[in-house]
Image (spheres, rainbow, N blue to C red):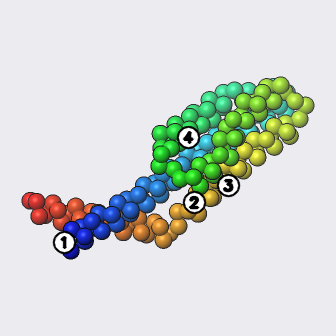
Amino acid sequence: MGFVTLALYLFLDVQSEANEVRAMALNLRIVRLIKTFTHEAQGERGVSALWIATRGVDEAPIAHRGRVDTAVRGFTDFIDSNLHYLDRDILGDLAGIQHFIERLPAIRGAVDAMPSSPDAVVAALTRGIADSHDVVVKLATRISLTRLAFAALAVADVLDMKEALDTQGG
């Protein structure tokens, strides 16, 4: 009976560590996707401001919008396909980015209307970019060095067990 209990404990411990590693991997992937999206949004902000300031003489921002849209699709597709793995805190953090994504068509409409000054458009894009950066910081702080160390140990434990099983089986 003691061996079964020990085996069950080890299984549950490894399962818990595997879930921890999965959560960290998700957080890291989300951070990378947000960083890509915000980088592209910064580019759109710059091109949009220049286009408005030059009264349409410079390159239209429409060409850059496709890059932002691709980054948004990559982010939203990843979130949608991993929704069942994300906890409530992460989903709450991501709500600000979702709000920014939902505001993009209106912001782009303001750019297309060619206002006399790019200030309002730049401010709206800057707010969304800043909110996105805040989410990156929140997610990154959840991935502490201690958690990374424990995850590395968990992976090492799993590899040791696999090696032991391979040795016993072979």
* Residue 93 showing in the rendered view: yes
Residue 50 sits in quarter: top right
Residue 28 location, x and y as percent?
Answer: 51, 54
Q: Nearer the viewer, mark 1 or mark 4?
A: 1
Q: Earlier in the sequence, mark 3 or mark 1?
A: 1
Give the labeled residue for mark 2.
140
Quadrant containing the N terminus in the rendered view: bottom left
The earlier-in-sequence mark between 2 and 4 is: 4
Gap between marks 1 and 4, in whole Å?
48 Å
The reply, left or right, for residue 152 in relation to residue 42 is left
Q: Is residue 6 left or right of residue 69?
A: left
Q: Tell me if residue 97 comes above or below residue 73 in the rendering.
A: below
Going by the numbered disc 3, the residue's amino acid type is Asp
Q: How many residues crowd mark 1 within 10 Å: few (<14), some (14–19), many (20+)?
A: few
Q: Between marks 3 and 1, how big is the CA–CA gap?
A: 51 Å
Q: At x 20% / y 63%, what residue is drawn? A: 163
Q: CA distance from mark 3 to mark 4?
A: 16 Å
As measured in the structure, the alpha-carbon distance from the residue carrying label 2 to the one carrying label 4 is: 17 Å
Residue at which label 1 appears: 1
Mark 2 vs mark 1, foreground winner is 1
Residue 50 shown left or right of residue 86 in the figure: right
Label 1 residue SS = loop
Q: Residue at x 65, y 46 (%)?
A: 95
* Residues at marks 2 and 1 touching, judged by CB atoms closer than 8 Å: no
- Nearer to me, 52 or 142: 142
User: The C terminus is located in which quarter?
Assistant: bottom left
Q: Quadrant of residue 4?
A: bottom left
**Residue 134 badge:** 3
The percent coordinates of residue 82 (x first, y second) are 47, 44
